Structures are given as structure tokens and as C-alpha cells.
């Protein structure tokens, strides 16, 4: 079945992952009407989902994912849910004459959106209230506040060594995370029990999709997990998204810590991955400079909003290895990006939405000319460098009308010429009838001039789109060198002697370890600065 197992590490990863899984639910057709005229589903859901049985014998279909977060990070989400209700151990009779003291921690309160989902679960005729949807912008405090998915209990992995927002014992240094993984595995054996449970269910495992926050200690935690994974699966593709926040702290010491964490992830996690794609939450300046400012208006200070943009890009990239017909495997994609064997590092950009006028391809070309694809680069803050050396790139297009595949519009040729003219090595894939679906939990930051399918109109509409067309561009080449150089320069002036938190524990760093990281970063800079260096590998 070409299964893929997803692993999520940390708050930012789980913000992104929650949007990702909420989107998957929108592909499912729960209609019992045989005349609903819905298009046939082109995606193989078994790639990401697993069928099973609950303890009461109820059939289940849940994401094949392992979610890791700190104590306090799961919000109102419980390990056991309505599909996997566990017997309350505290309600069982106790054979103890002295009695039992029952200690119950305060429950995380559910917001209006979660309360409405509960009412809809109890009464299928209940509809989602608009007030509950619009309240999300103010009520989301953690990723579970907008979660719509039931997970298998083995998917939920709470790290007990640290607590959210603990200033006394912060989870903020890469080596702290690596130590935490070792301690966590010693106590829980999560890898043996939960990870292997999902692996052993797979018939034809095609790879692993990793979402990892790398600004804090979760980078080191991820490294520990990938080291175990690589011992068992030395050749299986691993696509790792190293997720980073653009909102940097004011204190210089905190900035140094984040930059060192990112550098360690870019060298150590990259070495364990088949492809490593660093992604940054977009800033408002980037939205403006990309040309998308007229079509989306996200609050770039809200992780709820910015993680939704990252998720749309990641979800679109995954389409190619989830199709029912003529799918590209994850191995095909990673091999294409790392054709020379030394370019594991990749970047990712997207057009959200991909511009298309509802009057057709000719109208779109007449309206936008050569500015038909405003791209938001999620890996570096610059614009598309047409003089850059592009080693490889993979472009995915989704959500355009059927005439894209069966040409009936005379403007189609000119549209595609404008669309792909700025790319040099792309192999376009038109994902006919697979637009990006927008669940009610997705932020409503789209222009009022987008119709229900995300196509541009001249009118101001009162309703939000239910789907949008998207283009993503995954690439590798010299465009990545500015980001590498920024980290390398920061390492040169890093006051490592003052950063004692990195030297403690079984996985503490020495100064020679820091020098090794610097050398690895300079090697990456050489590879991605000069095309000739790649050819010599």
C-alpha cells in the first residue's frame, strides 16, 4: 500500500500537523447520496491512514502518526478518545482497607470550537456555528484547540521529563532534547512499543515524513529518534521538515541559542535524513514582497495562521506520492532532489493561492501577464533568484479546472508558458480535481474576491472559499546559500563558553564538537554556492 509514517516533534510541528490532518478529513466523502456528483477521489488514503479495531470491536480509520509534545502541550486532547474509550481505573473497586486518595489535575478548558464539535458528535444534524469558527483567532492557545481528528492512543506521546513554559528547567537547548529522548525511551520504550506497532502494520513502507521544531530542544529529541530509526531502516527515505519561527526573541543569548539549535539540526538531522527541508513561518514583509498580499491577509504573529501556510505547502508536496494512479514514490522525489548524492538540503516555496481568473485561462493571462505566479519562499526571505544555479526542482500544481488536462481553452498554452517560464528544471504535475480543501478550522485570511473554489473574481463575496488552487516548488541549488551563510557567520561569533546548558549531561557538547559543526556548515556552504562543487562529488 506504499505506507508513510508521520512523526511530529514539538509545538510548532504539532500546529502544522494538526492543520495537515484536519485537511485530510476533508477528502473523505461521508455522503450516502449516490447522486451527489462528487468527483472520484484520486488519493490513496491508506498511504497516511490505518484501519483497525477499538477495544470494543468498533472499526477505526486513524492517522499513521506519532505525536510528541511536552506535559501541558496537548491541551484538551486526551490519550483516549471516543473511539478508544478506556475504562476509568479510578472507578474500579480497590482491595485496600485504608482507602485511596484521589488526585485529579485541572482539565484544560475546551474552547467554543471544540465544544461545538462535541455537540455535532452527539447530534449529527447539528451544524458548525459560524461564531465558533470566527472565535478561533482569539481562542487558539495550543494546537489541540482546533484539532478535528481522532488519533490512536499509541499516537499520543507525552514527554514527561519537561513541562511547557517551565522557566526553571527550560526545554530550549539541542543537547537537552537529546538527553531527554534517552531518558524518555528508558522510561517508556516508546520506540519499541508505539513506533514498532505502526511499522509492523505496514505491507510496503515507502518512507517517513518528519515534522520537527528545531528552534528548541526538540531538534535534539528528533535526532535521538532518527538514530534509532536509521539503525532499523538504513535505506528507507526520510523527508524531514525542520520547522522554525520567524519571531525571534529580544535577548541576544536566546537568539544565539536558537541559531545554534538550527545549525545542529541542519548538520546532524540532515545527515540522518534523505531530504532535509528547513521552513520558516512567513512574516508580513515576506507576504508583501512575494506579491500575495492582495490575496491572503494572515496574522503573521499568530502561530495558528502561519502554521496553516506551512501545512498547505507540505500537504501539497505529498500529493505526488499519495495518488492512486501513476504515483511518484517518496524515493523518486528524494532521488530527484539529491541526484548528485550531496544535496540533501532543499527549499520550498508556494503560491497560495495559485492565481486563476474564474473567466478562464485567457482571462488570467490578460489580467496578470508574467506575474501569474507570485511565490512565497518558506526557506529563505529573499525573492526568486533567476541567476541562481538550480540543481533540481519539483513543481506541483493543484486545483485548476479540468481543461488543464483536457485542453479546451485557447489560453491554456499561454497560461502554462507564463506559469512555468520562471522555472528551469520543473516537471509539471497537474493534479486535476484535487484542490487544497479548507476545513472550518483553517484560518479565514483569504481575499473576499476569491470564489468558493479559490478562483479570482471582480466581485466582493461574503463567503470564504472552501478550496483553493496551489503551486509548490521544492528546489535545491545556490538559492539555499544565504541561509547557510547566515548560520555559519553566527557560529563564528558564538559565545559558546557562556552557553553552559549545551555542555551538561551525557550528550553535552565540547568546543571540538562546535568546531565540527562549523566545518560541516562550511562544507554545505561550498556545495550550495558553486555548482562545480556538486559535480565533483
Image: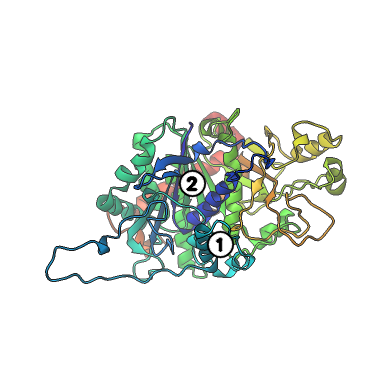
Q: Earlier in the sequence, mark 1 or mark 2?
A: 1
Q: Secondary structure at mark 2?
A: helix
Q: Where does the image place residue 325, in percent across and percent down from the top left? A: 60, 29
Query: 51 or 491, which lies in front?
Result: 51
396 vs 525, left or right, is: right
Left or right: 203 with respect to 462? left
Residue under pointer 2 = 521
Q: Nearer the viewer, residue 392 or 203?
A: 203
Looking at the image, residue 234 lies above or below residue 448? above
Residue lying at the far left of the rendered structure? 97
Whether residue 508 is visible to the viewer of this picture, yes or no, is no
Q: Residue at x 48, y 57 (%)?
A: 259
Say if 130 sits above or below 188 in the image: below
Q: Residue at x 58, y 30 (%)?
A: 327
Whether residues under marks 1 and 2 lie with C-beta atoms below 8 angstroms apart, the answer is no
Q: Which of the labelled discs sits on residue 303, or is there none?
A: 1
Q: Quadrant of residue 403?
A: top right
Residue 181, x across and y down, in percent? 33, 52
Mark nearer the viewer, 1 or 2: 1
Image spot of residue 435 (x, y percent) = 67, 44
Q: Residue at x 75, y 46 (%)?
A: 373
Amino acid at each position: 500500500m506504499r505506507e508513510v509514517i508521520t512523526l511530529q516533534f514539538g509545538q510548532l510541528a504539532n500546529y502544522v500537523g494538526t492543520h495537515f490532518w484536519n485537511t485530510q478529513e476533508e477528502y473523505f466523502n461521508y455522503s450516502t447520496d449516490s447522486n451527489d456528483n462528487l468527483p472520484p477521489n484520486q488519493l490513496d488514503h491508506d498511504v497516511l491512514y490505518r484501519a483497525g479495531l477499538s477495544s470494543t470491536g468498533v472499526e477505526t480509520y486513524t492517522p499513521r502518526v506519532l505525536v510528541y509534545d511536552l506535559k501541558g502541550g496537548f491541551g484538551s486532547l486526551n490519550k483516549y478518545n471516543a473511539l478508544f474509550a478506556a475504562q476509568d481505573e479510578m472507578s474500579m473497586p480497590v482491595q485496600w482497607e485504608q482507602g485511596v486518595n484521589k488526585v485529579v489535575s485541572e482539565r484544560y478548558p475546551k474552547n467554543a470550537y471544540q465544544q461545538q464539535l462535541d455537540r455535532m458528535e452527539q447530534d449529527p444534524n447539528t451544524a458548525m456555528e459560524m461564531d465558533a469558527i470566527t472565535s478561533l483567532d482569539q481562542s487558539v492557545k495550543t494546537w489541540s484547540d482546533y484539532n478535528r481528528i481522532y488519533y490512536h492512543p499509541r499516537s499520543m506521546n507525552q514527554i514527561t521529563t519537561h513541562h511547557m513554559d517551565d522557566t526553571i528547567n527550560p526545554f530550549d537547548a539541542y543537547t537537552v532534547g537529546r538527553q531527554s529522548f534517552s531518558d524518555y525511551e528508558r522510561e517508556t520504550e516508546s520506540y519499541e512499543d508505539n513506533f514498532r506497532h505502526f511499522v509492523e502494520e505496514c505491507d510496503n513502507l515507502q518512507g517517513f515524513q518528519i515534522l520537527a521544531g528545531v528552534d528548541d530542544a526538540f531538534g535534539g529529541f528528533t535526532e535521538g529518534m532518527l538514530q534509532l530509526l536509521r539503525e532499523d531502516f538504513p535505506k528507507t527515505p526520510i523527508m524531514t521538515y525542520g520547522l522554525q519561527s520567524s519571531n525571534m526573541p529580544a535577548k541576544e543569548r536566546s537568539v544565539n541559542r536558537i541559531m545554534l539549535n538550527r545549525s545542529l539540526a541542519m548538520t546532524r538531522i540532515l545527515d540522518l535524513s534523505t531530504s532535509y527541508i528547513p521552513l520558516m513561518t512567513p512574516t508580513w514583509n515576506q507576504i508583501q514582497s512575494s506579491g500575495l498580499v492582495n490575496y491572503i491577509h494572515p496574522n503573521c504573529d499568530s502561530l495558528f495562521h502561519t502554521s496553516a501556510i506551512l501545512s498547505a505547502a507540505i500537504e501539497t508536496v505529498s500529493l505526488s506520492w499519495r495518488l492512486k494512479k501513476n504515483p511518484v514514490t517518496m524515493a523518486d522525489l528524494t532521488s530527484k532532489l539529491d541526484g548528485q548524492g550531496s544535496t540533501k538540503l532543499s527549499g520550498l516555496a508556494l503560491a497560495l493561492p495559485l492565481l486563476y481568473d474564474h473567466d478562464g485561462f485567457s482571462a488570467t493571462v490578460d489580467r496578470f501577464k508574467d506575474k501569474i505566479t507570485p511565490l512565497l519562499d518558506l526557506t529563505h526571505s529573499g525573492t526568486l533568484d533567476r541567476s541562481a544555479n538550480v540543481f533540481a526542482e519539483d513543481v506541483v500544481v493543484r486545483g485548476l479546472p479540468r481543461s488543464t488536462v483536457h485542453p479546451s481553452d485557447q489560453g491554456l498554452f499561454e497560461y502554462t508558458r507564463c506559469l512555468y517560464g520562471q522555472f528551469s528544471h520543473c516537471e509539471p504535475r497537474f493534479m486535476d480535481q484535487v484542490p487544497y480543501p479548507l476545513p472550518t478550522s483553517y484560518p479565514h485570511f483569504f481575499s473576499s474576491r476569491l470564489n468558493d473554489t479559490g478562483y479570482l473574481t471582480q466581485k466582493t463575496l461574503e463567503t470564504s472559499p472552501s478550496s483553493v488552487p496551489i503551486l509548490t516548488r521544492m528546489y535545491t541549488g545556490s538559492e539555499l546559500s544565504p541561509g547557510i551563510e547566515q548560520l555559519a557567520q553566527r557560529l563564528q561569533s558564538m559565545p559558546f563558553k557562556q552557553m553552559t546548558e549545551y555542555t551538561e549531561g551525557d550528550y553535552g557538547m565540547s568546543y571540538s564538537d562546535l568546531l565540527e559543526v562549523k566545518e560541516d556548515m562550511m562544507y554545505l556552504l561550498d556545495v550550495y554556492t558553486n555548482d562545480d562543487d556538486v559535480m565533483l562529488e
